Image (tube, rainbow, N blue to C red):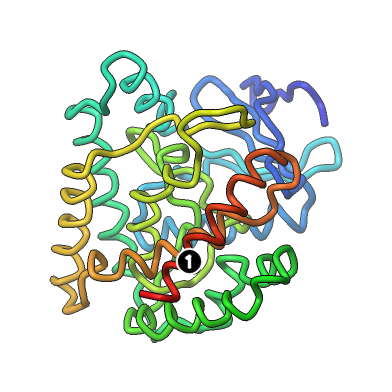
Amino acid sequence: MEKSFSIDGENFTFVKTRMYVPVSVYRGEKSYLRIGTAELIKKDAAIHKQFLQFGFPCPRIIREGTISGYSYYIEESVGDRHFGEIFRSDIAEHGVISGEHFKKFLELGERFINAQLSSMRDAALEKDFWLGIHMDYALYELPALKDMLRVAFNKSWQRISVFPAVLTHGDFNAFNQLEHGVIDTDSKYAFWGPAGYDAVTAMVQPSFFPKHGDYEHLQLYDFSREQMQEYLSMADALFEKHNLQKPSDFVPDFTFCRSVWSVVRMEKVPKLQAWRYKAFEEAVRGYVKD
């Protein structure tokens, strides 16, 4: 892939190639270019447009086209720093996430969840969720745990299937949320899943990283108990307006599901993979026993 592209007089410089999918991201002055094969870009753009149709706070698509044999779409910029970076700076400087920054994160989460609940349709399908959280990968990578994993998934599904299906981001955490919108609303992550999964993911994702040690990645931020309670209370209130049960009552169930997603496809970071495998097995055993 080229180091840069020029489209309609705007120069785009290479940022990264997405993990697991051959789609690259380039930064312009006020927008971002996503470029790859025609098949992938068409699929990503279609899902992104679904998020826009339901009013999710995600970037507008400015232009679509082809260049140098690749397909692309350009989306507006929704900020310069994601909340993961902002929270990391807070922790480094003050030891805690600042109230001001958490308030902005909470407000964006409220906009996102409110839009998400407008996408409600019939009850979520077990197969869609099974594939969305990569249970198939987990059974392949951890065959010794397959029986326990099936028991755990059945337990979680029996509980969370009370929620309707909503358009689900699939990796809703601080590293793809910026002050003015949510990014990475594409086919790599998104699926139709039970309402509540994204809201709980936003709070528990930091727990899937070690706080210290010799690992490829460490936990860069974490929420206080009060912040978690405030965020989940916000989500609960929105759900109650739709006569839905409160996601805060299903945190262990959604956390198990998120842990499945987080433990697989980690072969590029073997130290973190080993840490997650061990923590995952312990957590699943505890969840099955409760």
Q: Residues within 10 Å of mark 1 (few under 14, many from 20)?
A: many
Residue 255: quarter of image: bottom left
* Percent of width and height locating residue 220: 44, 29
Residue at 23% over, 39% down: 224
Q: Name the outermost residue toward the top.
A: 93
Residue at 62% over, 70% down: 135
Pick the front one: 193 or 220: 220
Q: What type is the residue that disc 1 sits on?
A: Cys
* Percent of width and height locating residue 126: 52, 83
Residue at 16% over, 43% down: 226
Q: Is residue 133 left or right of residue 220?
A: right
Pick the front one: 204 or 10: 204
Residue 108: quarter of image: top left
Pick the front one: 187 or 48: 187
Image quadrant occupied by the N terminus = top right
* Percent of width and height locating residue 72: 69, 43
Please, is residue 158 above or below residue 251 in the view? below
Residue at 21% over, 76% down: 245
Please, is residue 284 above or below residue 175 in the view? below
* Percent of width and height locating residue 89: 37, 19
At mark 1, the secondary structure is helix
Q: Is residue 244 left or right of residue 49?
A: left
Q: What number of labels is visible?
A: 1
Image quadrant occupied by the C terminus = bottom left
Q: Which residue is mark 1?
A: 257
Q: Is residue 10 left or right of residue 154?
A: right
Q: Is residue 22 left or right of residue 241?
A: right
